[in-house]
Image (cartoon, grey):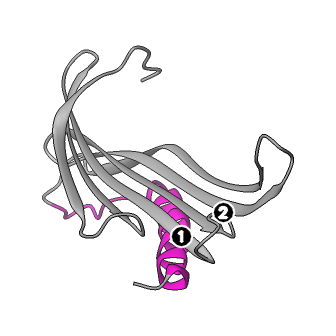
Amino acid sequence: MPIKNLLIIGLLLLPGIAIADNIPAPASSSCLSCMVTPITNEISYYKNIDDFGRSRGTTLQLISINMFHVGTDFIFEFTGDFNWDLDLYEDSDYYLELSLVKPIYRSLSVNYQRIYGTFVGEPINQFGLRLSLFSGL
C-alpha cells in the first residue's frame, strides 16, 4: 500500500476517534455503557539529523490510544511513523502498529498487535502480556 494512502488513513482515524467520545449512545441502544475514552491522540512532525549533523529527512508520527467499553474495557492503539528521506536507499518508508489491549488485573494486560511496514515483508501478528509500570487510569 503506498505511503500516501496509509498517511491519509491515519489522519482520518485521529479526528474520528477524538470526536467519538462526544457522541452519546442512542437511548434505545442495547449497549448500556458503550463509550470511547480518549487517552491520547497526537500528531508530531520531526526533522531528523544523524549523530554527524547530516539531515536524515522528516518524520510524521501519528499516535492514537483510546479506551472503549463494550461489555468490558479494551484499549485500541494506533501508532504510525511515516518517514521521508530517512533511509539512504528509499525515498519514503513507514511503520504501523495496530494494537488491541485487554486489561486483566491491575497493571497486567493481554496484548495483540498487528505490524505493517516497509521493512516487513508480510504483516506480523504479536501476542503477549504487558506490564504497565505506571498507569494514570
Rounded to the nearest angstrom, the CA distance separating label 2 from label 1 is: 8 Å
128 or 22: nearer the eye? 128
Q: Is residue 93 visible?
A: yes
User: SS of the residue at dot 2?
Assistant: loop
134 or 57: nearer the eye? 57
Task: Identify which amino acid the numbered label 1 is placed on.
Answer: Asp
In the figure, 40 relative to 135: above or below?
A: below
**Label 1 belongs to which residue?**
93
Q: Earlier in the sequence, mark 2 or mark 1?
A: 2
- Region of the chain picked out in magenta, as a range: 3-29
118 or 31: nearer the eye? 118
29 or 109: nearer the eye? 109
Q: Quadrant of the N terminus?
A: bottom left
Q: Is residue 23 visible?
A: no
Residue 59 in the image: state x and y as whole percent. 67, 60
What is the crowding at mark 1: few (fewer than 14 residues within 10 Å), some, or many (at least 20)? some
Residue 8 in the image: state x and y as whole percent. 54, 80
- Asked if residue 47 lies left or right of residue 123, the reply is right
Q: Main secondary structure of the magenta part?
A: helix
Task: Identify which amino acid the numbered label 2 is placed on.
Answer: Leu
**Label 2 belongs to which residue?**
86
In the figure, 51 relative to 82: above or below?
A: above
Report the disc number at residue 124: none
Residue 27 in the image: state x and y as whole percent. 26, 61
